[in-house]
Image (cartoon, rainbow, N blue to C red):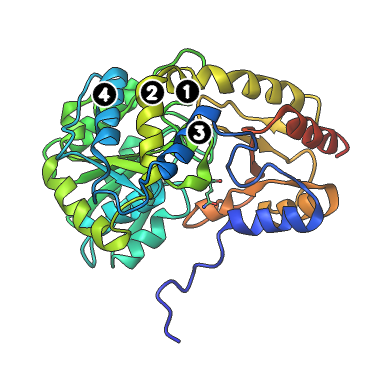
Amino acid sequence: LQTKLPKVGTTIFTVMSQLAAEHGAVNLGQGFPDFDAPARLVDALAKAMRDGHNQYAPMSGIPALREAIAAKTERCYGYRPDVDAEITVTSGGSEAIFDAVHAVVRPGEEVIVLDPCYDCYEPAIELAGGVAVHVPLDPQTFAPDWDLIRRAITPKTRMLMINSPHNPSGATLGADDIAQLTALLRGTDILLLSDEVYEHIVFDGARHESVLRYPELRERAFVISSFGKTYHCTGWKVGYCVAPPALSAEFRKVHQYNTFCTFAPAQYAFAEMIRDEPEHYLELGAFYQPMRDRFQEQLLTTRFKPLPVPGGYFQLVDYSAVSDLDDAEFCRWLAVEHGVAAIPLSPFYGTPPKGQRLVRLCFAKSEATRDAAIERLRKL
Ligand code: GLN
């Protein structure tokens, strides 16, 4: 069989979750909360199903949810996207990334990705016939080097993909990055895909620098978010894309033939939750910050060295004081022999840097889960 994605195997998240299950490891690998979604949201979902909202939703999403997203976006970023023309509800952030790439990338065109980057970016680009051009982020801070990115631009560059808060590092883009990004794209026709699925998990009083705040950027951008991260329900697979009308129209051409529409009952539940309980998303950073702080304090009692986490729910740790194995071998050993599942960073790179001794731990876990993991890590 001539395969289309010869380099791709099973995702590292699935591999590590399976390994965790087989070996009874505490799972800090795959990024998902191990606590419940808000009861109100679950009740609203059940009610939507009982009320008979069980058939196809409108292709772009139910009006009440698009309205709630528009109001939330205006409240958070001072910009109200057009409810009919600029918002499309998708079956998760990954579907939105796939649709955006397929909507605009033509065979042979280049898409700049910043390594390490989330593992679904490159396969989406390749399936569209495009070429992923990998530019490294700073190996310590995971900040973009805008000059390096500028040098990667060619006449074939169709799109740049950015991600803040960043998976796997938790790094965030600041106002200065936004200024440099704006200058970089000015006068080009390069499109922007901004993966902002962790938009509401930002710490230490910082504000999330959404591309939607900036007219010059948003006029060329697909901005993608995910309710799974915001509402502790990654298994519901609901996200959305905000893009200008012309880009949304192309996006919807792919979406309508990919999934057609998104699970209708959940759309009713999110519409109600976003509209009636804005505190949930407004206070999500404050909800996670004590978990981050406690987890970092606990890690300081181990030989794993925690890196700073400005946003998201992942903690990178340097394990060089514990082992000299490469990150993939280290994660296998850690799960099998020591009962803690982590995620190696190498799958997030086009070419993994040699000698990097970092793994990713998810701290969106109950106190009991985090404590159990730390107890095991302390023995190393
Ligand atoms: N986004 C999740 C993570 O980074 C994984 C989702 C998945 O397993 N595909 O851990």
Tell me: 196 left or right of 372: left
Measure the alpha-carbon separation of dots 2 and 3.
Answer: 30 Å
Q: State yes or no: Cβ of the residue under disc 4 lies below 8 Å from any atom of ligand 1.
A: no
Q: Is residue 34 visible?
A: yes
Q: Quadrant of residue 268?
A: top left
Amino acid on which disc 4 is placed: Ala
Residue furthest toward the right? 379
Q: Nearer the viewer, residue 315 or 357?
A: 315
Q: Could you tell me if the residues under marks 1 and 2 are in contact, i.e. CB atoms within 8 Å? A: yes
Query: What x and y, as percent, mark residue 189?
Result: 13, 46
Which numbered circle lies on residue 202? 1
Measure the alpha-carbon separation of dots 3 and 1.
Answer: 28 Å
Which numbered circle lies on residue 208? 2
Query: What x and y, as percent, mark residue 345?
Result: 58, 48
Query: What x and y, as percent, mark residue 12?
Result: 59, 56
Q: Nearer the viewer, residue 141 or 343?
A: 343
